[in-house]
Amino acid sequence: MKNKRRGLQTVELQNPPKIIASSTTVGPKEGMGPLSEYFDTILEDDKNGKETFEQAESSIMYSTIKDSIRKANLSETDINYLFAGDLLNQLTSTNFVARELDIPFFGLYGACSTMAESLGLASLIMDGGFAKYVVASTSSHFSAAERQFRFPLEYGSQRPETAQWTVTGAGAMVLANEGNFPKITHVTTGVVKDYGIKDAGNMGAAMAPAAVDTICRNFKDLGRGPEDYDIIATGDLGKFGKQLTQRLMMEYGYDMSKCYIDCGEIIYDNEKQKTNSGGSGCGCSAVIACGYLYKKLMAGEIKRVFLVSTGALMSNTSSLQGESIPGIAHGVVIEYDKEGVM
Amino acid sequence: MKNKRRGLQTVELQNPPKIIASSTTVGPKEGMGPLSEYFDTILEDDKNGKETFEQAESSIMYSTIKDSIRKANLSETDINYLFAGDLLNQLTSTNFVARELDIPFFGLYGACSTMAESLGLASLIMDGGFAKYVVASTSSHFSAAERQFRFPLEYGSQRPETAQWTVTGAGAMVLANEGNFPKITHVTTGVVKDYGIKDAGNMGAAMAPAAVDTICRNFKDLGRGPEDYDIIATGDLGKFGKQLTQRLMMEYGYDMSKCYIDCGEIIYDNEKQKTNSGGSGCGCSAVIACGYLYKKLMAGEIKRVFLVSTGALMSNTSSLQGESIPGIAHGVVIEYDKEGVM
C-alpha cells in the first residue's frame, strides 16, 4: 500500500452527478431470495420468452435500461452516452442491447466490477461537463455464464463450498446534473491485483486483494475509515471472500465489522437456496446497487455508501493455460441526505 | 441520419490533450508490409518467445506500453489511468498486461474500434481535468484471434476474397496536458449500426454503415466535409469495406476520394501477402494510428486526421445463433501544426 504514485487515486467530483433513476430486473431465483422487495421486475421465466440464454440476458438489460430512462421522464434520444458491459465473450449481451438503442455507446469489460466501472467512468464524464444524461448498466445470466465459463448445465457438476452462483439480473442508473437524488461524490479506480489464486471455484479469494487495495486507497486518499460509511459493499466476493477481505482489512488496521456487506453474500439465502458462498456476476453488484442500496438511500435509511464492485479477470483460455486469476475492484461513493444538504 | 438527439454527438475539447509519445510493435508479416518503416519494433517471432499466442499478445502490448511511457520520459507511477482492451474473450491479453502495471485500469471492449474508443475516453478524462497523464492502448494477434473467432490454424481453411487478416501488433499513446505535440481536438462517439450482414468473412460490409454514420455525424456537428481533413482513416474495413463506405458517403453527398484511407487496406500488400481484403483486429488501427499517422503528423506531412476505428461486435455464440453482426465506429480528430499554432 505504499504510495509512490501520481497523487491521489480517488477523484472528488466537483459537481457530483445525481442518480435520478434506477431500475433492476432479476431472475426467479433472485426473486425468491431475501431481497426480493428491492427489485423492480422479477422474471417468472429466466429465458424471458427468448430462445437462448444470451438473448434472454440482452432482453433483460434492454428492458431495464428502457425502464430507467422512462422513470427519469426522459427518452432514449436525451441520453448522451451509454456505459455498459457484461460477462460474455465480446460483450455479446450488451452489444445487442446497444444495437437497439440510438445512444453513443462505450463498451466496457471489468468482469463483475463492471457496474462500478461504468458508474465511475460515467460520473467522470458527467463531472467533466460532457453530458447532460448518461446511463450506466450491466447484466449477467446464470445459464449463459455457467456454460461459457464452467460446464454445460446438463453435466450437473458438483460445486465446491467456495463456489458462487452467477446472478441472473440487470441494473441500470440514469445520471444527471440536477435534482435532489443520491449523488456520486467520489470515484476510486482499481488497480489489478493477483496473488496467485488459480481456482475458478474460489473467485472470492482471487478478488479479495483487489477489494482491499481499493478500499484502503479510498480511506487514505480521503482521510476516512470504515466509520465514515453507513455501508461498504463489495461486489461479489461471497461469504468466504468477504471473510478474507475483512481479515485483510484488520491487518491494515481497519475494523469493517459494523458497516461491511458483500452483494454476493446477501442476495441469496445461501443455505436454503444452495448458492454456497453466494452470488456473483456483473448483475450481482448491479442489482444490489440499483435496487437495495439505491432504495435504502432514497428512503433515508442510509446516507453514505461505498460501492466496491469486484471483478475476476480470467478467461477460459487463461485458466486452461495455467494462469492465475487477476482481480480488480472499482469503487464509487454514493451519498444522499434526504432531509437536507450534506 | 436525422438528428432528433441530444445536441451534438461530437465533443470539442477545450484543452485538447497532447499525444506526447506513441509506440508500436508489429509481427513479422506486418513488418514485411509496405509501412514497415513506421513501426518501432518488428518481431522476428510472432510468439515473441512465449509459450502461447495469448501470452505473446500480452507481452507485445506490455512492452509497447512500457516503451511509450519511456519515450515520454515518465515512469509507470506517473500515469493516472490506463484505457485498454483487445479482441480476446474477457480481454485476456489486456488483463494480464494490467496485472503487471501499477496503474488504475479501465478495461474496454469495442472490438477493432478499441483504439479510438480508448483514445476518445482518455481524451475526455484528460480534458475534464481528472489526469495528468493517461495511456491508451490496444493489441491483437493473428493466431490468437483466428483460433478464437474462426478455425484452428491447422485446418488451413480457405479464405474468401472479402476475408481480412488479423494484425499482430500493439499500439500505445501517452496523453498529457502540455507540450507541442499532435493533439486530440474532437471526439465523435459511435452508435451501433446493424444492417443485417451475417458473414464473418465480410466484416468490412458489416462495419461500413457504422463508419458512415460516425463520419457524417462528425461532418454535421462541426460543419466540416472531407476537404477539411488531410486524412480520414477508417479502422479496418479492408478493400471491400472501404469501397462500400466511399459509395455510401457519396450517397450522402460527400466525395471522400481525395483524403480517405483504410488502415486495413494499407497495412499489407494484399496481393503479394495474400491478405485478401486487408488487415483487421484492434491492433490494425492501433499501429496505423500510433505509427503511420502519428509519424506523418510529427513530420508535418499532414496536419489534421480523423481516425475512425471500426468494430464488428459479434461473438462466436451470436454468430452460431444466427445473429447478424452489429458494427460500431468511434472517431477522434488529431491535429498538429509543426510550424505554428493552429
Image (cartoon, coloured by chain):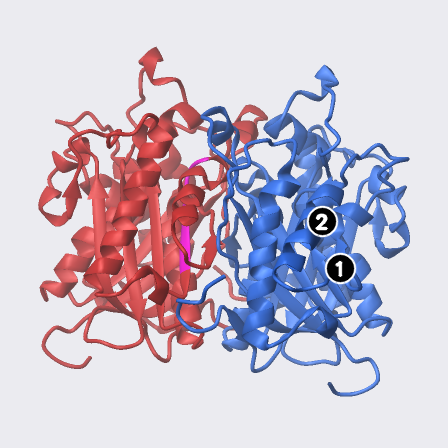
Chain colours: A red, B blue
Under mark 1, the amino acid is Tyr
Give the magenta-colored segment's residue range.
Answer: A82-88
The secondary element bearing badge 1 is classed as strand
At x 64%, y 64%, the residue is: B253
Q: Is residue B219 left or right of residue A227?
A: right
Q: Position of residue A314 (x, y in %)?
A: 49, 36
Q: Which residue is nearer to you in this view: A190 or B250?
A: B250
Quadrant position of residue A145: top left
Quadrant position of residue B246: bottom right
Q: Which chain's residue wears label 2?
A: B
Q: Which chain's residue wears label 1?
A: B
Residue located beneath label 1 in the image: B260
Location of residue B141 with respect to B134 vertically, above or below: above
Under mark 2, the amino acid is Lys
Q: Which residue is nearer to you in this view: A125 or A201?
A: A125
Question: Answer yes or no: do the residues labelled 1 and 2 have beta carbons within 8 Å?
Answer: yes
- Which label belongs to residue B305? none
Q: Position of residue A44 (x, y in %)?
A: 15, 31
Quadrant position of residue B297: bottom right
Q: Earlier in the sequence, mark 1 or mark 2?
A: 2
- Which label belongs to residue B242? 2
Q: Position of residue B106 (x, y in %)?
A: 50, 55
The secondary element bearing badge 2 is classed as helix
At x 9%, y 63%, the residue is: A299
At x 32%, y 75%, the residue is: A16
Residue B274 in the magenta stretch? The answer is no
